Each structure stands twice: as structure tokens, then as C-alpha cells.
């Protein structure tokens, strides 16, 4: 069954992991015969050449076939988003899937579903790092806001037609907190396996260093400072290479990282490569000796996140050390695909690095098993399973 899929969210072409994930997910779904409409936020509508360039910078072909609609920046953005989605729904000659990624946008989608449209409309919410906002509000001491938010979440999760969880720990919480909910599919984030097809270590600098690497955001809840702290417990040849943050904010990111490094006396062993465009990330990862995935002790880390970097790390052929949380434990096994460590112990992280330095055989075995494990999480396989779920919802 062909669908018109409308992703009710405003993307930003900044090279972020979120935009990358959406573009690749829905380009893969489109190859199943669906028509996909995406919205983006900008000061003005981009020309065809500018859109092609934005898509290429995210590692997709300009001929991907996705249909983009500009929602201008400024006041009234949500209203314009709803109006644009409503027009697309009214003009559709096939059933419509309205997909959202936040509770606020899910309520907008449910309001749109109540309107009269020529074809059947179904609403799907994807759960990401902000899955159940009331838990974040409660953790931050905003109890009244948490109470109201939980009521709204209960309504949304009962009324939508389908829920896409991106990690198993989300479903455990969903069943516990909101037992009366719509049907669920667990679809962890995907990875572009072709981008990691080469051999790990190709192009690595022969500087005698043992390179730990991390690529991603440096948000507080990700607990990236612990990577720098762990260096003080490791021998001098070990260096930490970091990449990511936000484009255009590299100077501020560099200053913040240097400040943490000075505090721990390791400023000579921390290197910041700046923000990398998505096509440049695989080479950065594959030239590492060990890849690191930290997480904090917050609800996003414990229950919500489905880290894209976990799948990229696994595809890279480089051994990885991963913070032990319910989110990551629902995906990989300690001692099989990764070494797992306490999220709040720099010394335990350092001990895991020493273990891999001392045993190249263990490092190679972990990397090989991770590469075999991640094959089930290609974007194509995720799209196939998503297609099956859409079929259940519409049939």
C-alpha cells in the first residue's frame, strides 16, 4: 500500500544527528514506494540547488526523492506547520501517515486527524531522547509541570495509532507508566553500513599514540567530561580525539574542552577536531584504537536514548567501551560486542582502556562481533520493519 508520509517536525540542515537520522530513515522508507514530505526551518525557501547541497552534506544523493517544504523562521511556526500539513493531507489521493517525534507535535497531529480528509489518516509517534517529558521535568524539580505533562502524555499514547520506540528500555517504561497505550514497534536507530565498508585503521597517523575517540554532541546529559577525566589514569601514549558539537560554535566548544582538560592536567593529550560533516565521520571513527560512548546518570541516558554513535561505532570495526545503562544494555552485551563500564567512574573507564591495550586479541574479537551484530540495524532493514509496522496500522 502506497502512503503519503508527512513528518510533522521542522528539520534544520545543520549536520545534526537528528536531521541525519530523519533524512536517511525516510529516504529508505521512500524506496518502499511511499511518498515522503519533510519540513525544514529557514529564513527563506531554499532553491533546488541549495536543497541538493544540504542533502549531499548529510550523505544522501541529491536524487533521493524526498519532498521538502519550507516553514519560515519566526513567530507562528507551529501554525504554519499545521497549515502546510493540512494542505498536503487534503490533496492526497492515498492514505496519510502523520509521523511526529514529540508529545507537543503529536497533539497537533491528533487534532489534524480529527478533521475531514479524503483518505484515511493515522498518527505515529517516535520516541527519542525526550520520550516522556514528565520524567525530565520531575528530575529537574519541576513537579507541577511534570504532573500536567504526564496527563498529556497519557492522552497522546492512548490516542495515536502507533508508537515507534527506538530502544527496548522505552517500552519497559511505557508498559509500566502508561499500560493503556497504542501498539508498539521497537525500531532502534539505523546505520549506513556502506559508509563503514573499509578496514578499520586505514589512514591512521603513525604518531605512536593510542587514540581514544568520541564523535557527537557535548551536552551535559551525555557526560562527555568523564572521557577527559579518565586520561589522568592512563599512560602518556594514550590521547583523546574529540569531534562534534554544533557547527559555528567550535571556538566555544574548544574552550570548554580545554578548560576541563586543564582541570585534570591532561591538556596536552586532548585534541578537538571541530565539527565534522556526516560524510567525514566514518573515517574519523575508523582511525581510532578504541571508541568511547559515555552517558550520564539522568533519565535521558538511563531510559530514552538510542545512541546513533553506538551503531556507527559497531560498524566501524573498532572496539568500543560503552557506559552501562538500561538503554545500552538492551542493545549490546558486556564482553561480547563491547566492554561496558559504570557511567560515573573515570577509573573504571581507564581500566577498560588498559584491558584493551593489553589484549589486542580481545579488542579484535569485540570489534568483529560488534560488526556482525550491527548488520541487523542497517537503514534498509529498519525501513523494512517500519514498512511492516505501517501495514499493521493501516490494515
Image: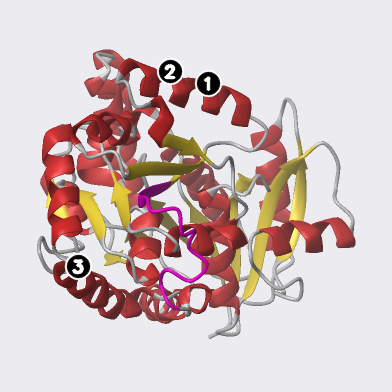
Place of residue 46 in the rendered image (x, y in percent of width and height, measured from the top left): 85, 51
* Secondary element at image label 3: helix
Query: Which image quadrant is residue 216 in?
Result: top left
What colour scheme has been applied to the protein in the rendered image?
Answer: secondary structure
Residue range highlighted in magenta: 199-214
Marks 3 and 2: which is nearer the front?
A: 3
Binning the other alpha carbons within 10 Å of mark 2 as few (below 14), some (14 to 19) or many (20 upward) gives few
Q: Which disc is residue 360 wearing? A: 3
Establish if 357 lies above or below 76: below
| Rendered location of residue 346, percent (x, y) | 18, 33
* Residue located 41% across and 54% down the image: 125
Mark carried by residue 259: 2
Residue 118 part of the magenta segment: no
> x%, y% of residue 332?
18, 63
Q: Is residue 395 left or right of residue 372?
A: right
Q: Pointer 1 and pointer 2: residues touching (CB < 8 Å)?
A: yes
Q: Is residue 305 above or below residue 95?
A: above
Q: What residue would you read off at disc 1?
A: 255
Amino acid at each position: 500500500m502506497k502512503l503519503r508520509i508527512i513528518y510533522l517536525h521542522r528539520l534544520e540542515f545543520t549536520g545534526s544527528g537528528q536531521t541525519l537520522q530523519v533524512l536517511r530513515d525516510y529516504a529508505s522508507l521512500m524506496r518502499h514506494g511511499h511518498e515522503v514530505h519533510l519540513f525544514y526551518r529557514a529564513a527563506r525557501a531554499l532553491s533546488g540547488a541549495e536543497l541538493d547541497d544540504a542533502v549531499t552534506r548529510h550523505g544522501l544523493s541529491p536524487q533521493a526523492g524526498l519532498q521538502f517544504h519550507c516553514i519560515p523562521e519566526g513567530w507562528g511556526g507551529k501554525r504554519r506547520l499545521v497549515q502546510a500539513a493540512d494542505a498536503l493531507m487534503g490533496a492526497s489521493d492515498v492514505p496519510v501517515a502523520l509521523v511526529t517525534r514529540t508529545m507537543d507535535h503529536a497533539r497537533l497531529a491528533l487534532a489534524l486527524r480529527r478533521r475531514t480528509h479524503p483518505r484515511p489518516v493515522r498518527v505515529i509517534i517516535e520516541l527519542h531522547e525526550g520520550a516522556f517529558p514528565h520524567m525530565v521535568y520531575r528530575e529537574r524539580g519541576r513537579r507541577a509541570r511534570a504532573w500536567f505533562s504526564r496527563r498529556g502524555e497519557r492522552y497522546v499514547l492512548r490516542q495515536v495509532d502507533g508508537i515507534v520506540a527506538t530502544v527496548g528500555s522505552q517500552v519497559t517504561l511505557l508498559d509500566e507508566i502508561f499500560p493503556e497505550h497504542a501498539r508498539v514497534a521497537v525500531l532502534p536507530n539505523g546505520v549506513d553500513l556502506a559508509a563503514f565498508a573499509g578496514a578499520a585503521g586505514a589512514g591512521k597517523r603513525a604518531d605512536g599514540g593510542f587514540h581514544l575517540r568520541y564523535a557527537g554532541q557535548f551536552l551535559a546529559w551525555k557526560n562527555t567530561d568523564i572521557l577527559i577525566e579518565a586520561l589522568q589514569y592512563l599512560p602518556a601514549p594514550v590521547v583523546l580525539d574529540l569531534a562534534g558539537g554544533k557547527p559555528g560554535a567550535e571556538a566555544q566548544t574548544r574552550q570548554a574542552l580545554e578548560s576541563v582538560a586543564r582541570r585534570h592536567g591532561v591538556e596536552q593529550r586532548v585534541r578537538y577536531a571541530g565539527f565534522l560533516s556526516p560524510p567525514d565521520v566514518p573515517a574519523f571513527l575508523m582511525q581510532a584504537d578504541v571508541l568511547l560512548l559515555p552517558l550520564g546518570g539522568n533519565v535521558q541516558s538511563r531510559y530514552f536514548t538510542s545512541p546513533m554513535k553506538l551503531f556507527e561505532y559497531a560498524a566501524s570495526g573498532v572496539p568500543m567501551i560503552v557506559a552501562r545503562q538500561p538503554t545500552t544494555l538492551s542493545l549490546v552485551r558486556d564482553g561480547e560486542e563491547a566492554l561496558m563500564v559504570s557511567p560515573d567512574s573515570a577509573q573504571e573507564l581507564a581500566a577498560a582502556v588498559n584491558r584493551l591495550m593489553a589484549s589486542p586479541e580481545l579488542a579484535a574479537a569485540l570489534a568483529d562481533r560488534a560488526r556482525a551484530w550491527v548488520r541487523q540495524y542497517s537503514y534498509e532493514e529498519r525501513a523494512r520493519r517500519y514498512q511492516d509496522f505501517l501495514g499493521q496500522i493501516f490494515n
